[in-house]
Amino acid sequence: MTIILKLFLLLSIVSLDAFLTPPPLHTTSTITSFIASSLSNSSPPPLHRPYYSTILRADASSPDASANESSSEEDVDNINSSSEKNASLLPSEEASDILSSPTFLKRKVEVLQSDIAALEKEIEEANAVVAKGKEEWLAKFDMLTKESQGMQDRLAKQGALGTETATVDVAQKILNVLDTYDRAFQSVEAATNEEVEIVDAYKKTYDMILEAFAELNVTKVETVGVEFDYEMHQAIMQMPSDEYEEGIVCQEFAMGWKCGEKLIRPAMVAVAA
């Protein structure tokens, strides 16, 4: 009875091992030797552990496998969440249809027209305020403008008169020097080369004074050949003249000067009779 139980157990073990272990691991000779040793009550040779079951248990119990599985699940969740987020960012077809619908566009035009009307009303109110201010202050503003312009003109005129008066005063003092030069040139005749050089030096000084007068707008009064002007000329005498008609200045005794239109000194002349 004991031998029968051992054989039954042995066959059960062999059948289970043959089912779980690949054929190359347990050959016929191995099984025969295992049965013989069992019948002789000797210890059986060690059987190989099931190959596939070992692999399955190792994969199931390894931490790397569990970590890889959890990381794969996390990656799938991240991909799904990012896809949902991108899908939420993109405008839906329904929203695009609403924005391009005639009703929405018509409402938008109405809003813009109302804004334009409000701005036009504000512009009209501002123009009304400006017009009212002009009615109230325009006359006063024009009066102030005219007074300011008149004041500026008076100040400019006074400045010009002041400059002209100062120029006249300076010119009157220098004219005495020019008269002295004129009398010297008329009375002195250079006989030698040295005297000629001296006269030329005085003439250069005389010309420099005339150039300064020209810069100050001080000019000579025209005399010989022009009609007598009692404002610019001072008649010393009348004399018959075959060259000039009656009333024409025929001779000059002293030069006259003016600054612009203001007389500095009248010219002393003789008038043809």
Image: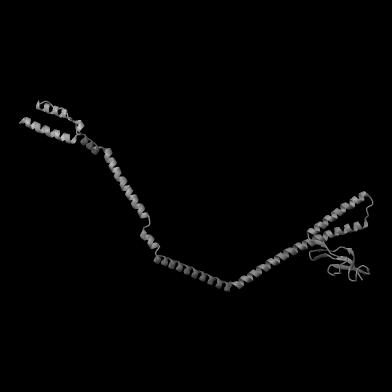
Residue 171 position in % (x across, y down): 81, 60
Quadrant position of residue 145: bottom right
- Residue at 45% across, 66% down: 112
Quadrant position of residue 146: bottom right
* Residue farthest left in this picture: 1
Q: Is residue 164 above or below residue 18?
A: below
Q: Is residue 255 left or right of residue 22?
A: right
How is the model colour-coded? one colour
Residue 2 position in % (x across, y down): 6, 30
Q: Is residue 175 above or below residue 238?
A: above
Residue 240 position in % (x across, y down): 94, 69
* Residue farthest front in this picture: 28
Quadrant position of residue 97: bottom left
Q: Is residue 260 left or right of residue 51?
A: right
Residue 235 position in % (x across, y down): 89, 68
The quarter of the image holding the N terminus is top left
- Residue at 14% across, 28% down: 32
* Residue farthest bottom in this picture: 135
Q: Is residue 62 above or below residue 89?
A: above
The quarter of the image holding the C terminus is bottom right
Question: How many marks overall?
Answer: 0
- Residue at 83% across, 60% down: 173
